[in-house]
Amino acid sequence: MHYLFEPGLLGSGPVRTALLVGAVVAITSGIIGVFTVLRGQSFAGHSLADVATTGGSGAFLVGLNQFWGFLVVGVAAAALMEAIGVQRRRGRDVATGVVLGAALGAAALFLYLGTLKTATTGASFTVLFGSIFVISPDTVPALVASGAVALLTIAVLTRMLLLTSISPDLARARGVNVRLVGIAYLAALAVSVSLAAVAIGAVLSTALLIGPSATALRITKSPARAMAAAALTGLAATWLGIVLAYDSYYWPPYGHGWPVSFFVVVLVLLGYLLSYARRPRRERPRSPHEGAECSPA
Amino acid sequence: MFTGLMLNTWITASIVAVIAGLTGFFAVLRGQTFAAHAIPNGAFAGAAGASLLGINVIWGLAVFAVGGALGIGALGSEQRGRKARNDVVTALALVLMLGLGALFVSVSSQYAEETYALLFGEVFGISRGEVAPIAGLGLAAVVAIGVAFRPLMLTSALPEVAEARGVSTRRADLYFLIVMALATSMTVPVVGALLMFSLMIGPAAAARSVTARPGVALALSVAIALATVWLSIALSYRTNWPLGFFVGVAGAAFYLLGQAARGMGASRTRLTR
């Protein structure tokens, strides 16, 4: 029989690392994701994750830690995407798609060469779907530092970023360098996507980036509240996902845990569907109960 | 290179290329690039589920691809121009399917090679029995696009005119997503989930950047897709490197060529003016 909280849960080293990394990832993704959703760049966010796969598999090939591969290729791809940066949205989608296709091809090649070299095929699964329980404690400081850098970038840029997200013309009129802000933002996005790729896998990092933020933006219109709500929603989904994955060791098929990524995705999605139950708040007279409703759930 | 099993490979891959060129053209024209990426990827999860249950992979692919298309179509916004919201819904549908895929792959005791083949394709070693269903589904997709060619064109190019004539853009979107899902379910086992996307977008985008005339662009898109696939098979056969690598790189190369050709054409017109 299993309990929701296994007695050994918090005593296990890998689980503690997973909880810590999960928290960093969820908070970074949640806050940056709010801008991704506001700017309508969900596809770019997802593409960066997939492109980072190429880096992850390349790092695997040369025997480096995956995170560095994700990070280097992710940031490079972000710069490339902004450089191609067709201003029309549709054109940008196509350019993003073509870059993505080429990068995925390269990922296929790296993974293939990797399997030739080491005669294991588990790598493709790890790179694509992540494994938060096998993160080595040595990488944790690097992960935390990268998350902090990304958040700091966003914090410095918040005002300009909001302005360029909501009204690029107004921002330009006020003398904001829209392009530069865009590049800085995409770089921060690449860092947060790389973090998420390590935790729940490259192809699923989109879940943490888009899900909590889209949920939060349905609940509240205020960007600051949305960021807080997104970070909290992401955090709840990740931690609960880790606990459930730990418990699932005792579920059928016995002796083989279910992947953390699966639980995180399902929880994130549940959150989004729940937010449909509540219409986004419109302008209306303040009521005495307002304060209670504002608290991010 | 052209004997026995390889002959099946050439036939199947050519069918896949025609379908990808055709559906990809509309995906690019309608701005549904992200959906074109999400549906094949999500379908991969269906394949993993089918192999877990021990049924034919095609069924799993079809159920997940069509389910994903319906989900994207149903939750997406009715108004045009709400692209941000549609992208969010597409992203979430995609991760849900991928999450299920991760679960299926991890629960089944199948080796990771199977996952790798579904994601990146396994075009060599297609048996004669597999060719017929792919050809059938391919024909169905072509007929489906042929039947609705005019409304699809109209809603892609002039949505306001289409609405005025009583053609529902939303319904056309949904119809096209389902056709794309069907086309996907047969192509994923051949070129792989991740690269079906490159085969749809690369050639179509290249064709669109060369000519603005829809008929010509459509034909060109199919032709480039065929060239991409044939080139990739030959190179993959010679080098033993994965097919997906060549498909991805060739797609991007054709797009860049198309962009370069357009750039030169544009500067020429500017000069003659």
Image (spheres, coloured by chain):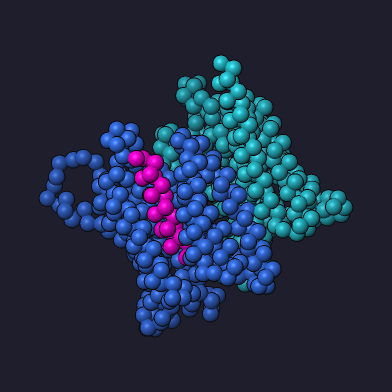
Chain colours: A blue, B cyan
Q: Could you tell me which residue is drawn at 63 percent across and 53 percent down?
A: A105
In this view, the residue farthest toward the left is: A288
**Which sits in the foreground, A218 or B257?**
B257
User: In which quarter of the view is residue A29 placed?
Assistant: bottom left
Say if residue B119 shows up in the picture: no
Question: Total marks drawn?
Answer: 0
Say left or right for B231 vs B221.
Answer: right
| Front-most of residues B168 and A17 | A17
User: Residue A193 colored magenta?
Assistant: yes
Q: Which quadrant of the rendered structure holds the C terminus of chain B? A: top right
Residue in the foreground of this view, choosing between A14 and B18: A14
Look at the image and tell me whether residue A19 can be seen.
yes
Q: Which residues are magenta?
A: A177-198
- Is residue B211 magenta-colored? no
Q: How far across and how far down the image is residue B45, in percent?
A: 57, 58
**Among all residues in the image, which is located at the extreme front?**
B271
On the picture, is B253 further left or further right than A187?
right
Q: Is residue B41 above or below residue B206?
A: below
Residue ranking furthest to the top: B273
Residue A145, x across and y down, in percent: 36, 66
Q: Residue at x 67, y 64 (%)?
A: A113
- Residue found 57% across the figure and 25% down from its top: B267
Residue B223: image quadrant is top right
- Left or right: residue A251 compared with residue B146: left
Image vertical order of residue B265 relative to residue B132, above or below: above
Q: Is residue A164 left or right of residue B234?
A: left
Residue found 49% across the figure and 55% down from its top: A74
Q: Is residue A202 above or below residue B146?
A: below
